[in-house]
Image (cartoon, rainbow, N blue to C red):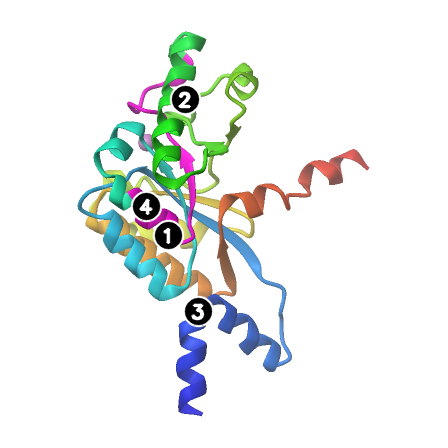
């Protein structure tokens, strides 16, 4: 019995599903995605990755090209952890204020830097400040990913405040925005994960939410 318990703890989210199934209650997981912008961060990303691994959770990281070039080993660790890597521009600029050529360069330079390390070109972009132009979807072949819940984690150093802002607001299939740029954000990420898993949520990468989204299909009926 003890060995079984240890095994289930190690499995994290999968164990939670099995437990509910064994109890004959709700088995459909409520999906949710947690995302981190502005990394890789020399000080905090590795601490975050360790905590995610301990919890068996995969996240999505929107990386800055200039930081990718500076910390390639951390990018490799994100990739090796099974997380999804997207682009957040090269210099953290408002892409909608740039010429198309300059905006495309921000994306292409970042994607090339990520590809150099991971062997894969990112397919998703979170534009800084959420500012993007529709024609850039075609020009860059990137899929834009915004967010549903923004606790403004960069404005406070109180991880409980960040956690409460997310947990109080979040719903199934939401995308949570955080930054792996401070101790409080990393701590909040762990608290958010632990709390929402207790509430029956399963953490997935953003692609799993975007491509299982049925809202538009329902509107067509
Ligand atoms: Ni940002």
Q: CA distance from mark 4 to mark 2?
A: 19 Å
Quadrant including the N terminus: bottom left
Regarding mark 1 in the picture, which secondary structure is present there? helix
Q: Is residue 115 above or below residue 43?
A: above
Quadrant including the C terminus: top right
First in sequence: mark 3 vs mark 4: 3
Q: Is residue 110 above or below residue 83?
A: above
Q: On the image, numbered disc 3 is attached to which residue? A: 12
Res 63 label: none
1 or 3: mark nearer the eye: 1
What is the quadrant of residue 151 in the picture? Answer: top left
Is the Cβ of the residue at disc 2 closer than 8 Å to that at disc 1?
Answer: no
Q: On the image, numbered disc 2 is attached to which residue? A: 108
Regarding mark 4 in the picture, which secondary structure is present there? helix
Residue at the image point whose x is 55% and y is 55% from the top: 31
Residue at the image point whose x is 60% and y is 81% from the top: 22
Is the Cβ of the residue at disc 3 closer than 8 Å to that at disc 4?
Answer: no
Would residue 209 appear left or right of 91 to someone viewing this image? right
Q: Position of residue 51 (x, y in %)?
A: 30, 60
2 or 3: mark nearer the eye: 2
Q: CA distance from mark 2 to mark 3?
A: 36 Å
What is the quadrant of residue 8 in the picture? Answer: bottom left
126 vs 64, nearest the viewer: 64
Q: On the rendering, which quadrant does ligand 1 occupy?
A: top left
Image: magenta residue range: 75-96
Say whether residue 59 is visible: yes
Q: CA distance from mark 3 to mark 4?
A: 23 Å
Would residue 68 appear left or right of 25 to someone viewing this image? left
Residue at the image point whose x is 55% and y is 71% from the top: 17
């Amino acid at each position: 019995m003890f060995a079984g318990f240890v095994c289930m703890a190690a499995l994290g989210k999968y164990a939670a599903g099995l437990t509910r199934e064994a109890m004959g209650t709700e088995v459909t997981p409520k999906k949710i995605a947690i995302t981190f912008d502005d990394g890789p961060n020399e000080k905090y990303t590795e601490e975050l990755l360790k905590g995610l691994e301990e919890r068996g959770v995969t996240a999505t990281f929107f990386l800055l090209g200039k930081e990718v070039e500076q910390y390639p080993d951390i990018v490799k660790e994100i990739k090796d952890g099974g997380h999804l890597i997207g682009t957040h521009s090269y210099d953290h600029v408002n892409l909608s204020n740039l010429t198309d050529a300059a905006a495309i360069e921000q994306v292409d330079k970042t994607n090339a830097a990520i590809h150099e390390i991971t062997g894969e070109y990112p397919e998703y972009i979170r534009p800084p400040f959420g500012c993007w132009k529709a024609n850039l979807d075609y020009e860059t072949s990137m899929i834009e990913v915004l967010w549903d819940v923004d606790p403004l984690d960069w404005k406070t150093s109180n991880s409980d405040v960040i956690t409460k802002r997310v947990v109080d607001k979040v719903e199934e299939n939401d995308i949570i925005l955080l930054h792996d740029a401070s101790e409080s954000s990393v701590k909040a990420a762990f608290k958010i994960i632990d709390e929402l898993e207790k509430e029956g949520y399963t953490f997935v990468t953003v692609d799993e939410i975007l491509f299982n989204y049925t809202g538009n299909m329902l509107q067509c009926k």
